[in-house]
Amino acid sequence: MCEICLNAALASRSRRGFLKAGGGLALAAYLTAQGGLPALAQGTNAPQPVSGDEALKRLLDGNARYTANQPNERDFSAGRAARVGSQYPFASIVSCADSRIAPELAFDQGAGELFVVRVAGNFVNEDGLASLEYGALVLGSQLIMVLGHTNCGAVSSTINVVKNNTQLPGHLPSLIDAIRPAVLSAQKEQAADLLKAATVANVKLNVEKLKNATPILSQRVAEKKLVVAGGLYDLATGKVSLV
């Protein structure tokens, strides 16, 4: 999101009582009012008042359609004009940047339904956290899924660095540093499949990081206004399993 769009969105919410005293940022009347508005229909653009658990079920149902090769038919031009002025994603996804994964396809969702943050290794840094806070607080997403995947190159590279002290060029070491705690955790478990164990550990560590991220996400989790879940995408089958 560009700075102009972000400023405009926050300014709009401020005018409608978006900011409250005590505990920092909290839900505005704008988001509270979504509960009485209709869900998104084909070709429309309206808030989707679903709980975090309902959002998770919607994702898993969509993935079941995807793996069965029975996706919903969509007219991608429908609702395009309506989406110009606003967006109402029902879920946020922290996904790896791997080109073999497309969350919208994997969960069989259309344009405007998922708010996706992508980075190699599907970990949460400061920029990603800010984006997810925006998705939860401003856009009203009540679910965040951290989505890892099998045969992740970023995790595999981190294992190589940890085991062999390999030196990587450019800014790659910062990526390795973010994933290193998961590899070290998996090593302690003495897992037979270190890559899979480290991939799952990486998902779980970032789920906990998001649940405890102050001041916004942790408060919403405590108030049961946000669910944070972890998933593992199997490259061979396309199936997403909760972890």
Image (cartoon, helix red, strand yellow):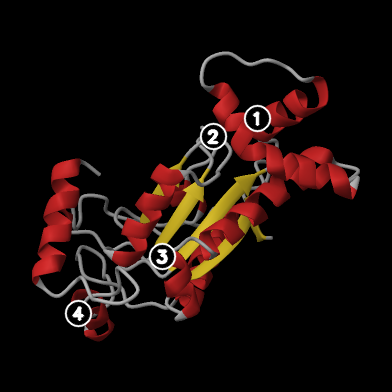
Q: Nearer the viewer, mark 3 or mark 2?
A: 3
Q: Which quarter of the rendered picture does the C terminus lie within?
A: bottom right
Residue at the spot of label 3: 215
Q: Amino acid at mark 2?
A: Ala
Find the distance from the CA under tag 3 to the CA under tag 2. 26 Å
Going by the image, does 191 lie left or right of 180? Answer: right
Badge 4 local density, few (<14 within 10 Å), some, or many (20+)? few
Pointers 4 and 3 in contact (CB under 8 A)?
Answer: no
Q: Amino acid at mark 1?
A: Gly
Q: Amino acid at mark 3?
A: Pro
Q: Residue at x 39, y 43 (%)?
A: 127
Q: Is 213 above or below relative to 188? A: below
Q: Which quarter of the rendered picture does the N terminus lie within?
A: top left
Q: From where the camera sits, is residue 113 visible?
A: no
Q: Earlier in the sequence, mark 2 or mark 4?
A: 4
Q: Residue at x 18, y 56 (%)?
A: 83
Residue 86 at x, y percent in the picture = 17, 59
Q: Nearer the viewer, mark 1 or mark 3?
A: 3
Question: Which mark, by number, is residue 153?
Answer: 1
Q: Amino acid at mark 4?
A: Ala
Badge 1 local density, few (<14 within 10 Å), some, or many (20+)? some
Question: Which mark, by number, is residue 29?
Answer: 4
Badge 2 local density, few (<14 within 10 Å), some, or many (20+)? some
